[in-house]
Amino acid sequence: MGGKNKQRTKGNVRPSSSGKAAELLAKDKGTVPGFVGFGATQNELAYVPTIQGLEEVDSLVDADFRMVLRKMSKRDATTKLKALQEFATMCKEKDAESVKGVLPYWSRIYCKISLDHDRRVREAIQQAFESLILQVKRNLAPYLKSIMGHWLIAQCDTYGPAASAAKMAFQVAFPPNKQSEAVAFCKEEITTILDDNIMKETPETLSDPQCVPEEEREGKYLRVVTSSFLAMKKLLDILPENERIVLKDRLIKVLSQSKFWKYCKHKNPQIRSAFFELIIAFCQHLPELMKSEAAKVCPAVLLSIDDMDPVVCPSVWAAALYVLSCIEDCWAHVNANKGVLPKLWIVLKDGGQGLASVIYPSLLPFFSKLPEEIIAPKMEFFTIFFSTCAKGLLSERALMSCSESSAIVAAIMECLRFTLHQNLGMDEDQQKLQEMLINNQLLPLVHSALKNPKLQNSTFSHLADTLLSWERRADNLEIKECADAYRRLLPYFWDGLSQLCISQAESAEVDKNLLEGVSSLLVLLKNPERAQKSIVKKKGKIRFFDEEGTMNVDRNNGNHLEELTFDSTKMLKSENLGDISRCAQHSNPARMVPLENLVCQLAKLCIARIKKHSEIYLAFLATLVSSFPSKNLFTVLQEGDNEGNAENSLEENNEVETMASNPAVQFLNQKLLTWMKDDKADFSSLIDMLYSILHCCQNNEKMIILNHISQMEQGWLILFYVIQKACVDPIKYVAISDWLKGDVLGEKLVLLADELCTMAMTTGSLPRKHDSNNWMLLGFALSKHTSNEFMIAEMYIERIIDRLHRALSKDLSEDLTKTGVMEPSLSFICDLASNFFCSIKGCLQMSSAEDLLFTIFQLCAQSQEKTHLSDTALDKLKNTWLLGLTSLINQQEGHLRKYGFFHSSATWLKNQVQTSALDIKSLQVLLSCVHTLLEKLLEGSRPQSLSHLKILVQCMTPDNSEWENLRQKLTLQWLSKVLLKEQISLNRDVVSTGSNIYSPDNIPNHLCTTTLLCHVLLQIQEDNISFEQKEIHPVTSISQIAAEIFYALQWCEEMKDFCPTISIYHELLLNFDIIQQLKKACSTTWGILFSRSLEKGLLWALTTSEYIAETKLDSSDNLKQLYGTVERFFPLTEASLHTIQNIISSLLQEDKELLLFQCIAKLSTSEGSEITSIDGGFGSLAVINSYLKEGVTEGGHVLHDQLFLDTLNIIMGWRNHEEEIYLFDSTLKNPEPHLLGINVEILRFLRLLIKYLPTLLTNEQWDFIMCSIMMWLEAFSNTASFDSKALMLHFVCQCCGVLSDLSYMFQTLTPEMSKTLPANLQNEWNNFFVEGIYSQLLPLFLKIAAEYKGIILRPTSVHLLTALGEASALIPLKQLMNHNLPAKFVAGQKSNLSDKLQSAMNTLAPLLLSRVRPVQITAYHLLYKLMPELPAFDNEHLKSDDDNGNDEEHGLSPPAALMSVISAQEKVLENMFSNIPVGEYTDIEPLSEAYYCILGYLLGWKLLLIFFKASPSELRAIYAPYLRDSKCLHKLLQNLFRLMPENPTLPGQCTDSASKGQRTLFTEKRTIFLQEIKALHTEIPRLACVVYYSVLEDLPATVRLWWNNQDKRVSSTVDKYTSKYVSNILSSQEIAAVQTSTQIFKSMVVKARPVAREVLAIYSVDDIFIELVIQLPTNYPLGSITVESGKRVGVAVQQWRNWMLQLNTFLNLQNGSIMEGLALWKTNVDKRFEGIEECMICFSVIHGSNYSLPRKACRTCKKKFHSACLYRWFTSSNKSTCPLCRETFF
């Protein structure tokens, strides 16, 4: 912060140094200077010691503390804050002795910083002080007096956190009982500091005006004064009384100064507030001082009561009350009528200006202290007072706030009660005052409240409380005069209130709010005790429930039975009936008689006016009748209106006649029934009146009335409101409980349920409002009530539930699509069912209830595509089902019906999975519901849950015949796949691969069944519940179920390549982690699998093998227990053969050998048809192949190798005696399956011999193998196709396999191995067989590849293409270049290739665009062989151009056939990546359309880069401009940065790029295999990384140019990625290439420096010595290579610069290596020394692009130039003159 970078004063050449100055002073004076400043007290200086100086002075201060203390003295707030934080940390970490050394210097620092302007600093120093106190403890005592004053001020800081921190430090330093002693110990010093701050300090003395801004100075001053006032108050509060007396004289001096009293009018509100707080403290602790200064105190306080600042107001009024209490003659020092009261009237008139809650509670104690002379005359004074209060109450600000208005009302009522109580005399003035208070103040206040609903709550509550108080005083006979006065006032009040209420009800401007206010007042006056409780204890509420809008809410959203919940507001309204008896017992006649009279008058008024204003008066009358039900009231209502209404009267009978005398019944007949006829009537109010009528009737009368009302036209609506109110009010419920249990209501509700269900199924429209009410009415009937019983009789409950169930089950079984249409009604049914299931324990023991629950379960367990339900409706169904299921499981008795919910659900689930067509989503929904069902069952350890579980498993499990039927429905399409994979052997036809493709959306029923059972068993296993097998199912055991599950898994494994649906389903099953879990639960499963494998073979054999592998069941002894001896496998059957083939790897070695011996023996004796039979030659050879495949030791040694040679001799013998079994002469159009089978096994045997025993074969045996393969190839070359049968495809694939093995063996033959083979074997193969084989094989591959027409290929077809591709890709280069393919040329295609090569390119390159991976990879391998041979043709053409003198610069295209493929794919990728920015990784799904497109594109580029790398430097310089100008390289690089992964680190590697030996996709060099790898999803990212690496390696200059032209975002992305993952590898490779280079330069030495990434080149000729240092950048090759000059001898400067520039050009602008650039540069320099002049355009002998010499000479100046340079010169200058002599160039 010290301004190190500021401009120094002129002449000041050295920076200032405080330390240096201190050192010089110490030398001169021999003392150590300190940083002298303002000390804690005025008589004491303190300093922070410097580092230099005498040891005895600063030996106690730790060096770290010295540094921190010095930082604290800095001006910058951030520096101080960090220093304080460091200080606090050091106090905790350092030892106590080191911390104690700081104490002498701490007081000054603390006193200064505790008043700092920055509040964070003030908080931090208090926290640091606390840390210091914890260490030094008692050692702080000597310094306490210098600190305590500022410490107390800090505790009163206006910034809360700083004050809290100071208080915390104070509490840490002193326990509560010692705090007063500590303050008393320092009281003098504290008083001095506070006195100085309040009376002496100014903004300029507290802060330096030259350094601190004015605003900051002023702020600090105001804060210090405020804190000092509060600190003085705190001092008086803490000090004991005797200590306060000691300070009395000093405080008198403070109070005597006029400046002190001026603070009451200070402009800052915080100072004024603190001032009045101090006055309060003086009044509390030193009242004698206040009395002595009464002349100053009273005006200062009482004349400030109009201070309306929110900060000051509470303190002013508190101080005013203290002054009035403390100073008896206070009014002698201030004029009340002129000074105080006018200000008070203004405050009250404005309603306290938003501070009513502060001011008005103080009014009563304020007026209680007013003397008689001030309030005289009373009538005038109180009239003014209450009038101003009333005006303040009606002010806008008061009406906006409930708390404000409540405070004003409370104050008015309190003052009124107090005034009335003080003036109860009988003289005339007091009576007039009493009348004025009631008539002119109290009743107008009530009138205002009636008109303003916001005032009603507080006004009515206080009025009721006041009335109750007057009644109690009137009944108190101990004070007779007082009681008489109140008895006289009460009638007077009631008369006035009655007149007020009646006048308001009669007024022409009457409205609903006013009448509601009158009714609320009357209800509250009826029971004033409740109002008194509400005043004593009020609770704030926030309501989100709109009572008026509840009936208009859309009933389709949410629970339609919300009205069932008890609402506290309705309970309060309905408590009136229950309160009648209690009110009658405790009622006061002085209140109840006038109140009832008033109610009767208002009721008569309502009857008279109800015709004109029916709505508001009817509601008012309903409130009166429901709140004050009595026969007297109904009698009054009948007076003057005795006309009966026959239409509405009750039916005449004896009971009705007896009821006629009841005035309530008369009112019902004559009035209420008529009003109920009106459609627009407010039924809620009418029903309240009905309950009041029923309150005045007997039980039999209630039954008659309710039965009659239910038969009315509006009967359902009336019943809805009657029952709704009974549900929320227990008293009303008891009043009509007998009628609710009766038959009339029960039958009507059953009929209602039937009507609603019928309407829902037929119309399906949204329910109307009254329909919604009817649904809710049913909900009331099915819900739980206060007595924990049903509202209606149980028999009717069961009938209603049965109707709901039939409505769902019958209609939905006919057409499931109806659910979407009837969804609104379905929602109501869910609400009904939910409330029913939650109502009564054991409600689900009804059969109809269980059936309803089962129907709901069915809807939940089916997908929304079938049920057409919305998400909302489905959620409701699920919640309803879960509620019912929980209730059913928790039944106490655990009783189960035979065909109850669990039995029905299990049966339905079994039917669904065995017969219904389920897709993936439907099955997942079904499993989700079953999972929830099992979860609920397995919760806890209830015995009935186990019974339910047993029923579920028993009913869901199929028997043996059902399992067999399910397996037969599974397609056998997988068989062709496993046959081609050599997992099993067959000699019969299998399902045709050309038809019966299994690709449905639905899952086979066998899979659905096994998935369901698997889910159940695994969930049982997780809960550790075990059953004996006999307990679960009488036929099928758990192990058998597990076997079926594994069978289904294996079927999915084999079928997932045929159908995407099965693949998804397979993943679903694997997520269950089935094998390991079922292995624990079912220990005998593998025995069942083995027995079924021996019995049925095929997929059971594969399942057994997979189970053994997955469960690690590789113990041969355990397996031997199952089969005993190998004799069990004989005689061989198809099933036993498949079993042997799949488990032979797990058999004991001796058993393997026994199998081998028996099979060879059987093979040697087989003749005729036995050779092709399973129990003969075919089966035996298949077992021998399986043994040979598994019988190779780790060292590659084959046991019993002679036996296999003998087997070959047997097979060769068949050629002589059983030649018809070989398919040599057949065209293979319709071969016999058994012949194909034996030929396949022979081919498999030959492949194994070639692989494991090639050196043991004799010349005759080799002749047999190679001649046989030639004849087999000729046999199938014309007939093989995609449509061939599985056995035929298997035969073709095995033939191709033998060809691949032979070709690979001869191509990789080592000299050692050649010696062990027959002498002429390799020559025969190369000279005779190769040409014959590949002349047929390559056209066959191209023919079959051409059969692909864009359809989805089956796995068998892919397998065929893979086999043909593997064999074709091994064609030797010679045969490929001399192929016999048909000629193929493209019009307009420029090419220098020979015709055969061009035909091969045009034939093979388009195959990269294929949508079959084997075709693409095979084409790549074939073209890979051709690429290095192609540049020679362009090079020859280039030389011929040079010989003809045509060496202009031009771009030459790479092979046109390859470029056309790349161009075609570029357009596709451009559309694909149009919205994806460069640098954002795109995940490509394997084997998708995009995958094939990108694969062909990347393979094409990889071939192009191979071609480029094989080209000489001259050609590379020509190809590069073409790639750049055509922008194909630009598009490639952009596409690569969308395909390369963001983190190419291989799994398991450290992601830190700096880690050595890190393996990434760039370090791994992998061959592109034809076989589909398992990790296909990583193939595109891997290939993209390989291509990018090759581009950087082979085209570094072109990539560098592209990178420099990109925008900032792309450039940064490429740079970061390349630097992190590629640059290090490429740099190391370049340096290593220099180190390992065998190239020898004459007169130049090249050395590598790997650590520095440098190459050193030393060139010396005669006396010339040149040293060059080539430095690779960190982002190589994106960054430019730098060339630095080393030693240089004998070379001119200009020449040297030219050569440096040339080397820079060769290294950075040529697409080559460092060695190539150095070689080019050396050649250029050598030519210069040979006398060849440089081109005067590029100043180089050798051209930088085409490496030509200057040949074009000017006829005038004879200077020679490069043709390319001249061409550029002419085109850029638009002239044809010589660059040197400017003559015309000819």
Image (cartoon, helix red, strand yellow):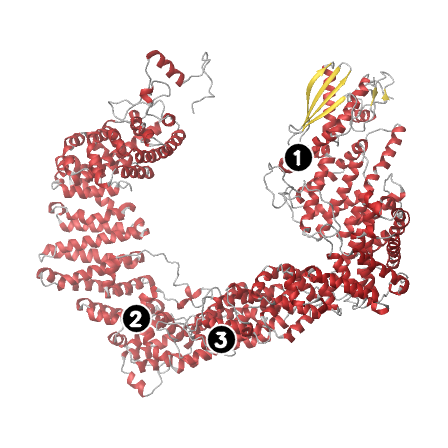
Which quadrant of the view contains residue 1523? top right
Disc 1 versus disc 3: nearer the observer: 1
Which quadrant of the view contains residue 1436? top right
Position in image of residue 1078 (x %, y %)? 58, 64
Q: Which residue does the image show at 32% across and 39% down from the upper left?
A: 160
Of the two numbered discs 2 and 1 on the same chain, state the one appearing first in sequence: 2
Position in image of residue 1567 (x %, y %)? 73, 45
Of the two numbered discs 1 and 3 on the same chain, state the one appearing first in sequence: 3
Badge 3 local density, few (<14 within 10 Å), some, or many (20+)?
Answer: many
Q: What residue type is labelled 2?
A: Ser
Q: Is 784 left, or right, of 341 in this rendering? A: right
Q: Which amino acid does label 1 sit on?
A: Ser
Position in image of residue 1000 (x %, y %)? 69, 65
Of the two numbered discs 2 and 3 on the same chain, state the one appearing first in sequence: 2
Residue 1365 seen in the current view: no
Mark carried by residue 626: 2
Q: Mark 3 points at which residue?
A: 850
Mark carried by residue 1623: 1
